[in-house]
Amino acid sequence: YVTVQMVDEVQIECYDSNTQRIITKQDWVDQANEDKVPDYLERATENIRGNQQVDKGNIGTLKK
């Protein structure tokens, strides 16, 4: 399971279920997160993990 966030066709973050974490791809994203929401990456990672489970269920439903 992989998610990618883009802004103006530039990748800013990605999440891979193999590593179970978000990797930021732009320095300004790290700085903005640290300044405004210091625990952003932890919170966002938990949200994506939840979305992963929901999407897995939705795909199972669609397969039926």
Image (cartoon, rainbow, N blue to C red):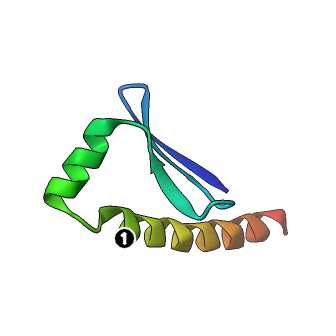
Residue 24 x, y percent position in the rendering:
42, 45
Quarter holding the C terminus is bottom right
The structure residue drawn at horizontal position 59% and vertical position 65%, both measured from the top left corner, is 20
Q: Which residue is mark 1?
A: 43
Numbered label tally: 1
Q: Nearer the viewer, residue 20 or 2?
A: 20
Quarter of the image for residue 11 reads top left
Residue 23 x, y percent position in the rendering:
48, 49
Dot 1 crowding, Cα within 10 Å, few <14, some 14–19, many 20+ = few
* Depicted 31 relative to depicted 37: above or below: above
Q: Nearer the viewer, residue 55 or 9?
A: 9
The structure residue drawn at horizontal position 35% and vertical position 26%, both measured from the top left corner, is 8
The structure residue drawn at horizontal position 46% and vertical position 73%, both measured from the top left corner, is 46
Q: Nearer the viewer, residue 60 or 31?
A: 31
Quarter of the image for residue 62 reads bottom right
SS under mark 1 = helix
Quarter of the image for residue 26 reads top left
Q: Amino acid at mark 1?
A: Arg
Seen from this angle, which residue lies furthest left? 35
Horizontal arrangement in the rendering, residue 6 relative to residue 35 (left or right): right
Quarter holding the N terminus is bottom right
* Depicted 62 relative to depicted 12: above or below: below
The structure residue drawn at horizontal position 24% and vertical position 54%, both measured from the top left corner, is 33
Seen from this angle, which residue lies furthest right? 64
Residue 50 x, y percent position in the rendering:
53, 74
* Depicted 24 relative to depicted 36: above or below: above
Seen from this angle, which residue lies furthest top? 9
